[in-house]
Image (tube, helix red, strand yellow):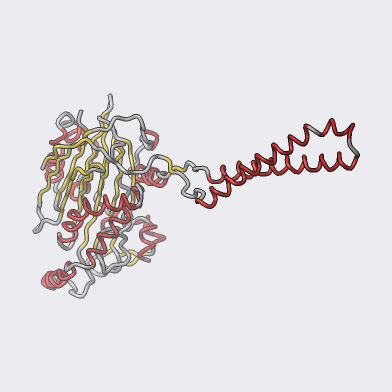
Amino acid sequence: MAGEGASIRGSHTRDLYSANPHHPNNNQATALKIIVVVSGIAIFWGLGITSNLVPQIFATSQVQIFSTAAFAGAGLFTGIAGFSAIALTTRKNAPQRTDVYESLRRNTRTAFKDHRVNVARARLIFDHHATSLTFHHQAHAIQGTRETMEDVSFCVDLPIGKLAGVFDGHYGIEVAKLAAQQFPLVFPAKLEETKGDVEKAFRETFQAIQEQIKGTEIESQRTLVKQFFSQQGTDPEQEVSPGATASVVYIPESNVAFVATLGDTHTFAFEKRTDRTQVYPLSPVLNWACPQEARRAGAVVVNTDYQPYYFLPEVVTELKEINKGLRSPISRVNVSRALGNIRDQAISQEPVVTMMQLNKETILLIGCDGVWDFVKKPKDFIRNVIEKHWDSPANIANATVDYAYEHESDDNISALVLWAKR
């Protein structure tokens, strides 16, 4: 379904820099005012006495001279000390300019590295002078060769900006469906609560949806799953529960794409240049072949026809060639981050958030693993999908799904494209 697009206004995201929240309270402000007044009086008093000191040298006794000088010095010292205290306090409590998005830039560089893209070509800073763009969208999905459809996508225009995402379910569609329904409702509230902290808002949104999942009847499907596995000759006691990977994009009026990723549903940006089309991966590789992911589980499993093999986190990098074959030792799920899967504590619901400045020549493409696992030749995909439909980006979602299906994708296939009005 195509999106008509909307001019994105009313964003509440943080500025590039954030002020230090530790400002003086009312009592501190009152004390500063008192110090200013006392210091001013002391200095004027000291200067006044000093101005009368020279004539008194010839008209008064030595004791009076020393007394007058002492009072003058005390006044000047008090005034200088007071204003020095004010200067130090003001400097200490002045807003400290801190780059609140450095962690997002670091995550983005990691995504580039994972996909072997030159980091130097990325726009990881805000263009504060950019004119707010109007973004459109188009989504397309097919069930493919699977017996059921478990992918769900959404895209909405909100007062805070454009919000779009793809959820790829496993062991049922319910988690993906719930997430797609709730994300447009929960995320704006979390963004408001966190005062525009996009990364924190994404984390809290996923966590809130995870809590909803725990409280629903989704777990009742576990009985059906057991029946399915028993019919397939698999151990019906294997701990499985439905879940969903995700990639969600938020674009406020700053034209910056914030991308939250769980698992192997990924977002890529494409930008046409004079001699080529540049690709920017905005989702890092998150699977059990990553040591930091494997450490959370304590070990990873490779299933064979004969028996499962368990490997320690220290050696998982040597198994990258079979990363889709690596699974959780608890649920045997092959993704390390996802919503749902409430019986597997090794699977994390914390998204990795990246960012990139967009312009009129940028196209964003969100796809499930049913797409990306079957793009074996990226240059061929770019030539036959992205470049071919560059002037009609609404066709890219359909072309992406067709490309994956023609290249023997055996999964549900979902794609969602976002582009700015040109």
Q: Is residue 336 above or below residue 226?
A: above
Q: Is residue 339 above or below residue 235?
A: above
As rendered, which of 297 and 42 lies closer to the eye?
42
Q: Is residue 55 above or below residue 300?
A: above
Question: In the orientation shown, which residue stands out farthest toward the top?
Answer: 274
Q: Position of residue 42 (x, y in %)?
A: 69, 41
As rendered, which of 2 and 171 lies closer to the eye?
2
**Which residue is depicted at the point 23% across and 71% down?**
239
From the image, which quarter does the N terminus lie in?
top left
Question: In the orientation shown, which residue stands out farthest toward the bottom?
Answer: 237
**Which residue is depicted at the point 26% across and 69% down?**
343
Q: Position of residue 14 (x, y in %)?
A: 37, 43
For the image shown, how many numbered marks are present on the structure?
A: 0
Q: Position of residue 62 (x, y in %)?
A: 91, 40
From the image, which quarter does the C terminus lie in?
top left
Res. 376 visible in picture: no
As rendered, which of 387 and 69 lies closer to the eye?
69
**Which residue is depicted at the point 33% across and 39% down?**
356
**Which residue is depicted at the point 17% across and 39% down?**
137
Q: Position of residue 163 (x, y in %)?
A: 23, 45
- On the picture, is 125 further left or further right than 156? right
For residue 267, what is the image quadrant?
A: top left
Res. 103 visible in picture: yes
